[in-house]
Amino acid sequence: MSDKPWQFKAGAPSANPSGRPKGFKSMAEQIRKKTNNGELLIAFAFKILNGEKPQNAHKDPTLEQRIDAMKWLADRGFGKSAQLVHLEIEDNRFPEIDFSKLSGNELSEFERLIDVAIGKTPSLPGKVIDHE
């Protein structure tokens, strides 16, 4: 027997062979409907932000709650700010190349091949044509 009985097992009969019932609304759809497309949520957050006591509340909102309301409104009104992540990647795929040992012709051919690779010039050997 599986240690995760709630998981779907390949070959087992479907738990919902007919699919979602007709008229099924996702949670997001239900929330939008019950909150007048989010207007009630926004009004509530503004009340908290302005320090107003919500209906049936015993206390005024704390400073922390007001800051949370401000963040919630800002995130939804302007999008969440980008989260910067510092990555250090060691890339050993390309060994260092000592170009000092190449002749002038070899350097020219190497430069031509780079230009071809980046689409700067056609792939025919010969004179390099700069398209800029």
Image (cartoon, grey):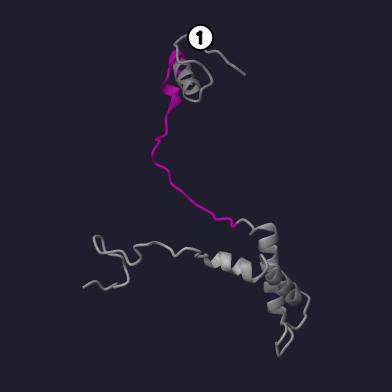
Where does the N terminus fall, quadrant-wise?
A: bottom left
In the figure, is residue 93 to the left or right of 48?
left
Q: Quadrant of residue 33?
A: bottom right
Q: Quadrant of residue 31?
A: bottom right
Q: Between residues 84 and 28, which one lies in front from this camera angle?
A: 28
Q: Which residue is mark 1?
A: 127
In the figure, is residue 110 to the left or right of 31?
left
How far across and how far down the image is residue 97, in percent?
A: 42, 30
Residue 130, compared with residue 5, is above or below; it is above
Q: Between residues 123 and 37, which one lies in front from this camera angle?
A: 37
Q: Residue at x 73, y 72 (%)?
A: 43
Q: Secondary structure at mark 1?
A: loop
Q: Residues within 10 Å of mark 1 (few under 14, many from 20)?
A: few
Q: Between residues 58 and 100, which one lies in front from this camera angle?
A: 58
What kind of residue is marked 1? Answer: Lys
Q: Residue at x 49, y 15 (%)?
A: 122
Where does the C terminus fall, quadrant-wise?
A: top right
